[in-house]
Image: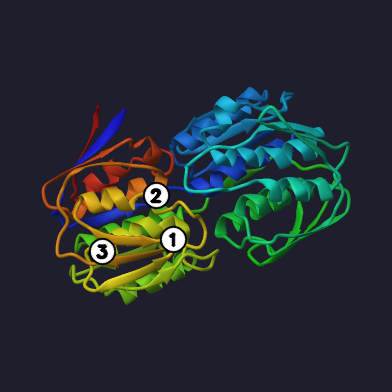
Amino acid sequence: MDKLIIKGGRRLHGEVKISGAKNSVLPLMASAILASGVSTMSNVPDLKDVETMGHLLENMGAEFSASNSSVTVDTTAMNGMTAPYHLVRTMRASVLVLGPLLARMGKAIVSLPGGCAIGARPINIHLESLQKMGADIVLEDGYVKAYASRLHGAHISFDIPTVTGTENLMMAATLADGETVIENAACEPEVVDLADSLQKMGAKIEGAGTSKIRIFGVDDLKPVSHSVIADRIETATFMVAAAITGGNLFIRGARPDDLRSVIEKLCEAGISVSDDSPDGIRVWSDGKLQAVNFKTMPYPGFPTDMQAQLMTLLSVAEGTSIITESIFENRYMHVAELDRLGAEIRVDGAVAMVKGVSRLRGAQVMATDLRASASLVLAGLVAEGKTTVCRIYHLDRGYEAIEKKLLAVGADIVREKD
């Protein structure tokens, strides 16, 4: 198992190129199921999750290939309808094949999902919504078994916005009979990216990016060629890396409009951000950081996927910060590891109180999930001495070659085998 060894104290300077969004490419790959033929996605990050989704599609009879930041999915001979446990257990996004399979094949057998252990993320919203669209669904032996000769349009109102739920239902509705309306839909940029790709395939979709999406079903879709948007969470992570080290980074490919809530908090913390360039964002800091309070919220609010990273920054800021996690109940598992490095963080339910300290000290820490991994790497960049981050397989699920990118802008970081 790999680990990262970081010697802290170096200011980061230079340029980082942002990869395509993990949370966009996975639903895009799943959407290839909806049409017979060859679909191609470009600007695809080289990530473990992309490989897993490729294997999942191959398991169902599709042909999958990846090279030079592109993936190709050929569904011409696809005849399988099962997403097995050994693949789904490692990646929650596997559930995204449920809607497309049911819409095109009339049948889907999908293992209940796994992924990061950051709290309960039930898929009952997906299942209840598909039932409203005419699907017969049973849960048996740890699998969702869904059947429908053809789905029909329905009016669906989510109790809470759900990204994967919105994406799954939007894909399913593209081939349904009639009109489907999704109320309280997720508004994330990745949802918009999927809708844009589906429209290229011939889908009729209105309102993506708002809380109300209308999908008018069509009889068939065609394969697509689509470029994946830049990863906003990778972008924000490198913004924090520049700030926490007192550095200066130009982050090429960043989309500032996707990150307004993050930019606002970083500026409030005393960090300088310029988005004047059409090619990206520049972030710089003198290392004098100020405490800020924030609450994670559905987009366009502050993203839960950046909570751990900003907490790390605030652990060395002047003053006391209050963080409220409103999305996932178990997303403070990194706190104990940050405390090992000298942070002073107290958690009471969904609220974390972060008292800034003058410095962190290197130690061995263990990653518990994807974004926790990133927060520990950031801590290692600023900590005195050597920090060893173990179990970084989580990190490899969501960040393409993060140690190489950090090394190129001045970090002292190396990957080693245990």
Which quadrant of the figure contains the C terminus? Answer: top left
Q: Residue at x 28, y 48 (%)?
A: 337
Q: In the image, which disc is placed on residue 349?
A: 1
Residue at figure coordinates x 51%, y 36% from the top left: 50
Residue 361: mark: none
Mark 1 residue element: loop
User: Quick one: SS at disc 2?
Assistant: helix
Q: Is the N terminus in the top left, top right, bottom left or bottom right quadrant?
A: top left
- Nearer the observer: mark 1 or 2; the answer is 1
Mark 1 or mark 3: which comes first in sequence? 3
Nearest to the observer: residue 45 or residue 226: 45
Instruction: Kindly indicate whether the residue at mark 2 contacts the one at mark 1 (C-beta within 8 angstroms).
Output: no
Q: Amino acid at mark 3?
A: Ala
Q: Among all residues in the image, which is located at the extreme front? A: 348
Residue topped by disc 2: 371
Rounded to the nearest angstrom, the CA distance separating label 1 from label 2 is 19 Å
Question: Left of 325 or right of it: where is 311?
Answer: left
Q: Is residue 406 visible?
A: yes
**Disc nearest the viewer among 3 and 2:** 2
Q: Is residue 64 visible?
A: no
Residue 264 percent coordinates (x, y): 39, 74
Amino acid tagged 1: Gly
Q: Nearer the viewer, mark 1 or mark 3?
A: 1
For disc 2, the neighbor class at 10 Å (few under 14, some 14 to 19, many from 20) is: many
Q: In what element is the residue under mark 3?
A: helix
Q: Which residue is mark 3?
A: 243
